[in-house]
Image (tube, rainbow, N blue to C red):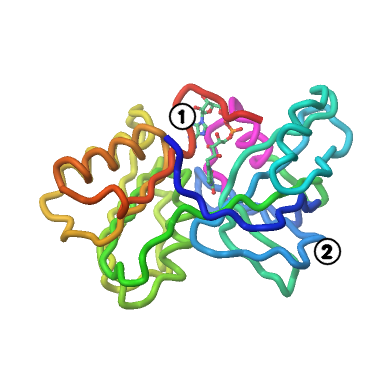
Amino acid sequence: MIPKVSRPKGRRVIPLEVRANERVSPSFTRVTFGGDALDGFTGHGGDHAVRLFFPRTGQNGLWLPSLRNDGWMAETLLQPTSRRPWVRTFTVRDHRPDLRELDIEFALHGDAGPASAWASRARPGDPAGIIGEGRTYLPPDDADRQLLVGDESALPAILSILSSAPHTLTGHAFLEVPRTADIRTGIPCPAGVELHWLPRDGSDTIPGTLALETVRAHPDLGAPAYAWVAGESKLATGVRRHLTGERRMAKKHIGFYGYWRHGRASVG
Ligand SMILES: Cc1cc2nc3c(=O)[nH]c(=O)nc-3n(C[C@H](O)[C@H](O)[C@H](O)COP(=O)(O)OP(=O)(O)OC[C@H]3O[C@@H](n4cnc5c(N)ncnc54)[C@H](O)[C@@H]3O)c2cc1C
């Protein structure tokens, strides 16, 4: 499954440090990163993502690749694990160029994931790095009715998309989260977009299953002109298959991205 990505040009690795770490709700923590090297970084909003570099347990400091654009991954994977950092992909939830800061919101899923473990303990001064990744939420200008679907890993992207959407946008957003206490209130969102919060609340279904079933069962999605779905791989492919099959949407009007795969660690 290869998503259509709009990648920034002239990508470079940017060294940063943690400035703050705030628990937003039981399953989410927001880490603020800052540094002078953020000068010149362009945050594109929406689902704009970055690769995040952070140290493995026991490493002193953080090694970062020196190659720009696409060479960095090979350079990183060639390092011995004593030096090689972890690399994972996250959404830029907020970017404050004047303060040379950006925020990432991590969905915490326990210590089995290095990024989840690192984020739950990150402290001001901890080293990190990023390289810009790009966007897959690419609606046509006239797509004034949309469908957005995600599990907790895509919540930061969908909230960011909604906060910068035109006030005339209408449609539905299905947001699956681990618990009722993870539901956000007072978020910026166009009045014509109906938010469907879907807390699993102790059910041990694989994340994304509830959102997929809810979208499939919805009686009337109102013929969206564009749909974007991200999260666990089966959610992304399942919603796309449903929309192209039962709802007769054209593939070119659907952006989808399997952010992670149940039972499989990310590469890097
Ligand atoms: C473009 C893009 C943007 C993303 N933005 C965000 C974001 O803003 N916030 C965010 O939290 N995630 C985001 N993700 C998803 C994130 O990259 C993955 O969840 C990643 O696997 C987390 O790394 P990890 O080291 O914690 O776990 P890994 O080492 O990759 O995986 C370890 C185990 O945990 C499982 N796992 C991974 N992620 C989750 C999860 N969310 N819930 C439950 N189990 C999981 C895996 O299946 C595996 O069994 C994004 C992914 C992409 C591709």
Task: Give the crowd class for mark 1: few <14, some 14-19, many >=20 residues within 10 Å.
Answer: some
Report the residue at 28% width, 54% height from top. Answer: 196
Could you say where residue 175 lies in the image, as x and y percent from the top left? 35, 50
Residue 36, numbered circle? 2
In front here: 119 or 93?
Answer: 93
CA gap, disc 1 and disc 2? 35 Å
Q: Position of residue 111 (x, y in %)?
A: 61, 28
Q: Amino acid at mark 1?
A: Arg
Q: What's the mark number on residue 261? A: 1
On residue 47, the disc is none
Question: Residue 142 in magenta?
Answer: no
Please state if 121 lies on the left or on the right of 219 as rendered: right
Say what secondary structure mark 1 lies in: loop
Mark 1: C-beta under 8 Å from nearest atom of ligand 1: yes
- The question of residue 119 being in magenta is answered with yes
Q: Which residues are magenta?
A: 105-120
